[in-house]
C-alpha cells in the first residue's frame, strides 16, 4: 500500500494547506478527500507538529520553564490506568467539544460547547478547583453546565429567527471565531501553572504548543469533521502522558 508519510513533499503539501487556512480561515468541509486520506492527513499533521514542536519546546524551556502543576497533581491522585483514561479520553473530549465542536454552527453544537465552557468557568474561576476533582462543588458544576446546555438548545430550537441570525453571524465572522477559539484554548492552559505575574507575562510563549494544536485541530475540525481533531488531541495527550508515566 502506498503510504504518504515517507514522502517529504507530502509534508510540504500539508504545511501549505495549513498556511493557506491560517491566512484565510474558511468554514467549508473538504468533500474531495476520502475517510482514509483524512486519517492520513490527521496523522501527517500530528507528525508535522512534532517536527516543529520538539526543537521549539527546547527553546521555550531554555527561556522559561514553569512546572505544570496539573500534570504532577493528576499523576499523584490517579493510578496509571485512570490517568490515561482522564488525559487521553475524558479531557480531550471535553476540550474538543468546548473549543472545536461549534466551529461549524448548529444549535446542538453551540449548546454543547456553551455547556462545557460554563463548566470550565465554574471550575476554574468561580470555585477555583480542578476539572477532574469530584469535590463538594462537582455536582453543582455539572448541573450548571448541563442546565445551560439544555437551556441554550431549547432557546435556539424555539426561535428560528435567532437560530438563523446566529448562523449568519458565524458565517460572516468565522475568521474571528476561529482565532478566538484558538487563543482561548491555548491561554486557558495558564491554569496548569502557578498563577503569578511571571507566568502571565510569558503566557504567549509557554502556550505556543497548545496554540499550534488549536490551529491544526481547528483546521481538521472544519475541513474533515469533529472526530479528526479529537483523534489528533488524543494522540498528543497519549504521547505526553506516556512520557510522564515513563519518567515517573
Image (cartoon, rainbow, N blue to C red):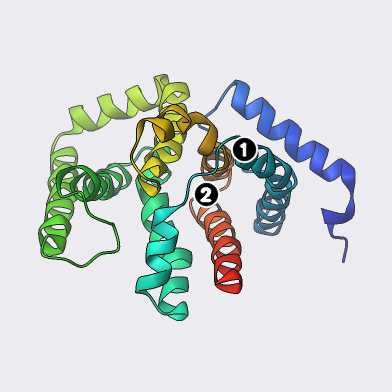
Q: Cβ–Cβ below 8 Å for labels 1 and 2?
A: no
Q: Residues within 10 Å of mark 2 (few under 14, many from 20)?
A: some
| In the image: residue 125, left or right of residue 90 | left
Q: Quadrant of residue 65?
A: top right
Q: Residue at x 74, y 36 (%)?
A: 15
Q: Residue at x 53, y 51 (%)?
A: 229
Instruction: Indicate the secondary structure of the residue bearing disc 2.
Output: loop
Q: Residue at x 88, y 41 (%)?
A: 9
The residue labelled by disc 1 is 60
Question: Which quadrant: the C terminus?
Answer: bottom right
Which residue is more in the foreground, 42 or 198? 198
Q: Residues within 10 Å of mark 1 (few under 14, many from 20)?
A: some
The mark that comes first in sequence, 1 or 2, is 1
Q: Residue 227's x, y, as percent?
A: 51, 56
Q: CA distance from mark 1 to mark 2?
A: 32 Å
- Taking 102 as reference, is 150 above or below it? below
Q: Mark 1, mark 2: which one is toward the viewer?
A: 1
Q: Residue at x 48, y 51 (%)?
A: 226
Amino acid at each position: 500500500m502506498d503510504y504518504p508519510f515517507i514522502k517529504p513533499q507530502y509534508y510540504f503539501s500539508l504545511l501549505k494547506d495549513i498556511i493557506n487556512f491560517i491566512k484565510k480561515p474558511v468554514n467549508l468541509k473538504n468533500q474531495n478527500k476520502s475517510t482514509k486520506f483524512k486519517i492520513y492527513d490527521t496523522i501527517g499533521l500530528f507528525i508535522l507538529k512534532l517536527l516543529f514542536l520538539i526543537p521549539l519546546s527546547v527553546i521555550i524551556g531554555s527561556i522559561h520553564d514553569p512546572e505544570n502543576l496539573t500534570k504532577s497533581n493528576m499523576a499523584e491522585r490517579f493510578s496509571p490506568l485512570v490517568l490515561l483514561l482522564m488525559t487521553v479520553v475524558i479531557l480531550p473530549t471535553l476540550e474538543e467539544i468546548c473549543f472545536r465542536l461549534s466551529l461549524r454552527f448548529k444549535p446542538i453544537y453551540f449548546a454543547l460547547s456553551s455547556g462545557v465552557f460554563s463548566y470550565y468557568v465554574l471550575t476554574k474561576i468561580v470555585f477555583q478547583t480542578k476539572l477532574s476533582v469530584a469535590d463538594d462543588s462537582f455536582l453543582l458544576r455539572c448541573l450548571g453546565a448541563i442546565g445551560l446546555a439544555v437551556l441554550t438548545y431549547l432557546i435556539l430550537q424555539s426561535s428560528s429567527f435567532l437560530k438563523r441570525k446566529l448562523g449568519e453571524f458565524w458565517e460572516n465572522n468565522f475568521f474571528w471565531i476561529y482565532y478566538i477559539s484558538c487563543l482561548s484554548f491555548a491561554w486557558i492552559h495558564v491554569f496548569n501553572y502557578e498563577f503569578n505575574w511571571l507566568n502571565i507575562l510569558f503566557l504567549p510563549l509557554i502556550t505556543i504548543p497548545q496554540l499550534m494544536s488549536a490551529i491544526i485541530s481547528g483546521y481538521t475540525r472544519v475541513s474533515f469533521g469533529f472526530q479528526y481533531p479529537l483523534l489528533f488531541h488524543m494522540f498528543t495527550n497519549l504521547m505526553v502522558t506516556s512520557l510522564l508515566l515513563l519518567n515517573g
